[in-house]
């Protein structure tokens, strides 16, 4: 179908292909079309390092025959090519092994108002390439005016506009539009033999919610220069405060452990833990795909299961794993609408805010560490063990004393969740996985 362009024609195309697949012998057929445009510019020291402006349109299919599954994809949306794609997929499915858990979900109804989710900003389409380049250049230029900054990793501005169409043979046929924009900056400060670095970024669905270049630059400068003249510390067990970004990192590890895929594959220390206490009573965690305007919000997942608000941990008790249809069948549970391709992904996965200001949490420590950044690997979902290189700020008598480097933090996610003593009131939904500042009773900090 050359020249396919309008949303209705794309929807019609998907529905026609589903019907064609059924006629060719498939028991179940799913067709997804992504129609997107993207822009990304990287600036370093005032010059454009890379610039991408592109549009793409791709179609993927999933066919199931006698509980045997095959996939196919194409960027050629001509009718003849797509029908060949479907026919070949049906033949391949017959050659594969049957899987008792394979199959599309039952027919789903989307009861919520997709437009009310506020995923689309037409103003992003009005930005010119020059506007976008200027935003990135301005952000870096402001930061480099600070004499403490010696170099730049660069600034970037990105936009994406995406239409998603999903049709399957159980009668599901829906589409939605979404937008995204992001501005980021990375900086270096210090002497040649003792350089420190950090970054700051802001991503939103709506351009008018994006932090201004001045704010991005100021936060990136502050995060970078606070690490100047770091000291080493001896190995010891101390209280550790996780800044909100570090709490989000910790929650990302937790998400990997409550993934239904990890649970049925027996690669999570939380398997067989539903209904048991895994965290302090203060801990309540949700995955919510229906909060208007957030980056993780969506009307339905990649299988057409409606997004929902799922309570994952309630007052310390593990209530739900997050599942796609396949994982749910393996675990004899219901899908939570978290399908992402053949795996699962978070929507807005977050720890609910507490009552303490971040400053109050820091002042509660006689001595300890504020964790500001980690690096390397060292996460084991099978055991929950954590061991990561880290950077931080040392606290003495309730006040930040100096930055520290060349340290490693180690512990176990299960123990950390049970020993969270304070939760901050500074929850911000900056990414699909978000959390406020938290204080851990004690962790091992390895230094000199």
Image (cartoon, rainbow, N blue to C red):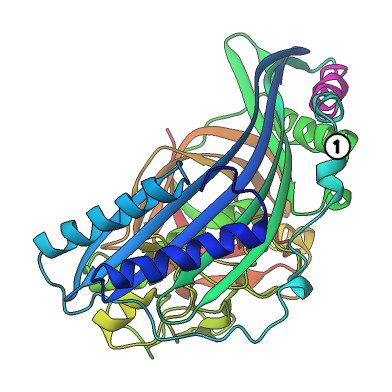
User: Label 1, on which residue?
Assistant: 127
Q: Secondary structure at mark 1?
A: loop
Q: How far across and down, in percent of the image, does residue 37 sit?
A: 65, 41
Residue lying farthest to the bottom in this orientation: 275
Q: Residue at x 29, y 66 (%)?
A: 63
Residue lying farthest to the top in this orientation: 192
Res. 114 in view:
yes
Q: Residue at x 69, y 59 (%)?
A: 177
Q: How far across and down, in percent of the image, does residue 91 sit?
A: 17, 59
Decide whether residue 144 is among the magenta residues. yes
Q: Residue at x 58, y 29 (%)?
A: 231
Give the side of residue 38 with respect to residue 92, left or right: right
Q: Nearer the viewer, residue 139 or 20?
A: 20
Is the residue 403 above or below the residue 314 in the image?
above
Is the residue 41 above or below the residue 329 in the image?
above
* Span highlighted in magenta in the image: 135-146
Q: Nearer the viewer, residue 361 or 99?
A: 99
Please tell me in which quadrant of the rendered image residue 57 appears.
Answer: top right
Give the side of residue 88 with respect to residue 12, left or right: left
Decide whether residue 280 is among the magenta residues. no
> Is most of the magenta stretch helix, strand or loop?
helix
Quadrant location of the C terminus in the rendered image? top left
Q: Nearer the viewer, residue 298 or 353?
A: 298
Q: How far across and down, in percent of the image, does residue 234 sit?
A: 46, 38
Is the residue 201 above or below the residue 152 in the image?
below
How many numbered marks have been drawn onto this rendered protein structure? Answer: 1
Q: Nearer the viewer, residue 339 or 147?
A: 339
Give the side of residue 366 with respect to residue 20, left or right: right
């Amino acid at each position: 179908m050359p020249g396919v362009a309008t949303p209705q024609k794309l929807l019609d195309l998907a529905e026609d292909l589903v019907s064609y697949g059924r006629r060719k012998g498939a028991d179940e057929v799913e067709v997804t079309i992504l129609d997107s445009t993207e822009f990304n510019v990287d600036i370093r020291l005032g010059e454009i390092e890379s610039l991408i402006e592109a549009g793409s349109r791709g179609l993927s299919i999933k066919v199931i025959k006698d509980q045997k599954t095959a996939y196919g994809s194409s960027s050629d949306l001509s009718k003849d090519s797509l029908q060949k794609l479907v026919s070949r997929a049906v033949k391949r499915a017959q050659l594969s092994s049957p899987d008792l858990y394979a199959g599309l979900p039952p027919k789903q109804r989307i009861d919520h108002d997709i437009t009310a989710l506020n995923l689309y900003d037409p103003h992003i389409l009005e930005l010119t390439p020059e506007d976008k380049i200027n935003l990135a250049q301005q952000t870096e230029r402001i930061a480099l005016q600070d004499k403490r900054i010696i170099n730049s990793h660069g600034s970037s501005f990105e936009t994406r506009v995406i239409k998603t169409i999903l049709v399957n043979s159980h009668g599901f046929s829906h589409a939605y539009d979404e937008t995204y924009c992001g501005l980021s900056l990375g900086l270096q400060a210090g002497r040649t033999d003792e350089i420190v670095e950090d970054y700051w970024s802001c991503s939103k669905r709506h351009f008018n919610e994006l932090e201004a270049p001045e704010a991005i630059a100021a936060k990136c400068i502050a995060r970078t220069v606070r690490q100047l003249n770091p000291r080493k510390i001896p190995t010891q067990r101390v209280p550790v405060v996780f800044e909100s970004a570090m709490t989000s990192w910790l929650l990302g590890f937790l998400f990997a452990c409550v993934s239904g895929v990890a649970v049925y594959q027996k690669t999570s220390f939380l398997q067989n833990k539903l209904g048991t206490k895994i965290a302090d009573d203060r801990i309540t965690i949700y995955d919510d795909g229906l909060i208007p305007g957030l980056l993780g919000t969506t009307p339905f997942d990649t299988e057409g299961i409606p997004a929902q608000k799922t309570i994952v941990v309630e007052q310390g008790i593990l209530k739900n794993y997050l599942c796609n249809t396949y994982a749910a069948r393996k675990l004899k549970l219901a899908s939570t609408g978290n399908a992402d391709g053949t795996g699962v992904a978070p929507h807005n996965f977050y720890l609910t805010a507490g009552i303490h200001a971040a400053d109050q949490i820091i002042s509660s420590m006689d001595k300890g560490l504020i964790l500001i950044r980690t690096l390397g690997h060292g996460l084991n979902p099978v055991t929950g063990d954590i061991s990561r290189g880290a950077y931080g700020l040392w606290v003495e008598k309730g006040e930040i004393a100096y930055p520290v480097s060349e340290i490693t933090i180690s512990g176990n996610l299960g123990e950390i969740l049970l020993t969270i003593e304070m939760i901050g009131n500074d929850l911000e939904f900056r990414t699909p996985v978000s959390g406020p500042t938290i204080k851990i009773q004690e962790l091992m900090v390895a230094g000199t």
